[in-house]
């Protein structure tokens, strides 16, 4: 029974159960607004990227599954940080339609501490 398994999987020892489990995990860890799931096989990075642009500034932070233990835990950390970042940016003042340097610095510090 192949269940739509690519031909290469049999050569690499990937079982049908492994494919089903991988699909189930992937379904639970779908990308969301401002949070994107990344899996890089060549660099062995798996985790989440938080990316938020606001008033001419872009904020990005990667949350590694390895650092947080699991995909669910790294997602939870990313969601928590995203909520904090959004709250900070919503409460901030604008100068000429842009975020102030102080706000950008605070946001950077928040991301560094996450």
Image (spheres, grey):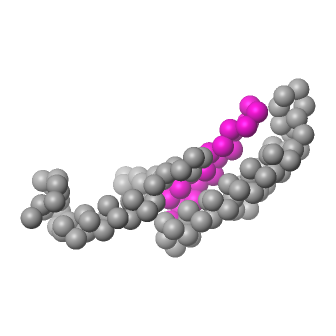
Return the residue found at the far left.
1
Work out whether residue 46 or residue 97 is closer to the camera in this orientation and state it: 97
Residue 49 at what x, y percent from top left? 56, 51
For residue 52, side relative to residue 20 (left or right): right
Residue 82 at what x, y percent from top left? 68, 54
Q: Compared to 45, does 92 lie above or below?
A: above
Q: Compared to 112, does 13 lie above or below?
A: below
Seen at 9% across and 64% down, the residue is 1
Work out whether residue 36 or residue 12 is closer to the camera in this orientation and state it: 36
Q: From this viewpoint, is residue 112 visible?
A: no
Q: Quadrant of the C terminus?
A: bottom right
Residue 87 at what x, y percent from top left? 79, 52
Decide whether residue 52 is among the magenta residues: yes
For residue 9, side relative to residue 65 (left or right): left
Seen at 86% across and 47% down, the residue is 91
For residue 11, side relative to residue 73 (left or right): left
Return the residue found at the far top.
96
Seen at 83% across and 37% down, the residue is 99
Quarter of the rendering containing residue 78: bottom right
**Magenta span of residues:** 47-67
Q: Compared to 18, does 107 lie above or below?
A: above
Work out whether residue 88 or residue 9 is closer to the camera in this orientation and state it: 88
Q: Main secondary structure of the magenta part?
A: strand
Residue 57 at what x, y percent from top left? 73, 36
Q: From this viewpoint, is residue 98 visible?
A: yes
Q: How many numbered dots are placed on residues in this image?
A: 0
Quarter of the rendering containing residue 21: bottom left
Seen at 32% across and 61% down, the residue is 23
Decide whether residue 81 is among the magenta residues: no
Q: Compared to 47, does 91 lie above or below?
A: above
């Amino acid at each position: 029974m192949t269940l739509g398994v690519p031909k290469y999987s049999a050569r690499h020892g990937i079982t049908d159960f492994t494919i089903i489990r991988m699909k189930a995990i992937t379904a639970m860890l779908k990308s969301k607004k401002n949070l994107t799931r990344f899996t890089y096989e060549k660099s062995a990075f798996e985790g989440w990227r938080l990316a938020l642009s606001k008033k001419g500034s872009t904020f990005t932070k990667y949350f590694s599954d390895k650092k947080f233990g699991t995909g669910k835990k790294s997602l939870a950390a990313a969601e928590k940080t995203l909520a904090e970042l959004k709250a900070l940016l919503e409460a901030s003042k604008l100068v000429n339609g842009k975020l102030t340097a102080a706000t950008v610095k605070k946001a950077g510090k928040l991301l560094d501490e996450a």
